[in-house]
Image (cartoon, rainbow, N blue to C red):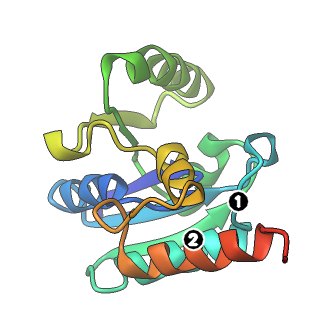
Amino acid sequence: MRTAIYPGSFDPITNGHLDVIHRATKLFDHVIVAVATNEAKHPLFSIEERTRMVERAVGHLEHVQADAFEGLLVKYVERRGAQAVIRGLRAVSDFEFEFQLALMNRKLNERIETIFMMPKDAYTFLSSRLVKEIAQLGGDVSPFVPPHVKAALGRKLRLGQPQS
């Protein structure tokens, strides 16, 4: 069985992420959306919240599952018995960083391939950071995230605001 890991912080998961996941299901028998613990990014949502949002977003997709991990990606890929890592590329600016990561992962384990996938043109501008910023400023994020993620952003941001 061909298994791919799609790692990321998914803080929160966006329609661009979901587009890449749909594309990956056409190439692999099993896709694991691996929510990474990366406190250096100061996530808005906890690892548990992000994993639940991903689970809900991919629950209707056969052979796709959500999981959380911490530590070295190549070790996680080995533990899960996967053959490839999926990385989304939105723009040329993403490529240099992602290429460096792919080369380092290859040095650590040459058996693991990295597959770069581009989302639909409609999502090339989209990032979790921008979605959070739009939501914080009171904008409508419904074109960019699933409804349950929009609701979670609303709840999280209301809780973080000072009460008058």
Query: Which amino acid, mark 2?
Result: Leu
Which residue occupies the foreground of this view, 95 or 43?
43
User: Which residue is under mark 2?
Assistant: 153
User: Which residue is under mark 1?
Assistant: 44
Marks 2,1: beta carbons within 8 A: yes
- Report x, y in % for residue 135: 52, 60
Query: Which amino acid, mark 1?
Result: Leu
* Outermost residue, front side: 164
- Report x, y in % for residue 100: 52, 16
Residue ID at (24%, 37%): 118
- Report x, y in % for residue 28: 24, 58
Which residue occupies the foreground of this view, 153 or 48?
153
Residue 74: image quadrant is: top right
Q: Nearer the viewer, mark 2 or mark 1?
A: 2
**Separation (CA) of disc 2 from disc 1:** 9 Å
Q: Residues within 10 Å of mark 2 (few under 14, many from 20)?
A: many
Give SS at disc 1.
loop
Which residue occupies the foreground of this view, 159 or 5?
159
Residue ID at (69%, 75%): 158
Q: Which mark is residue 133?
A: none
- Report x, y in % for residue 40: 80, 40
Q: Is residue 88 visible?
A: yes
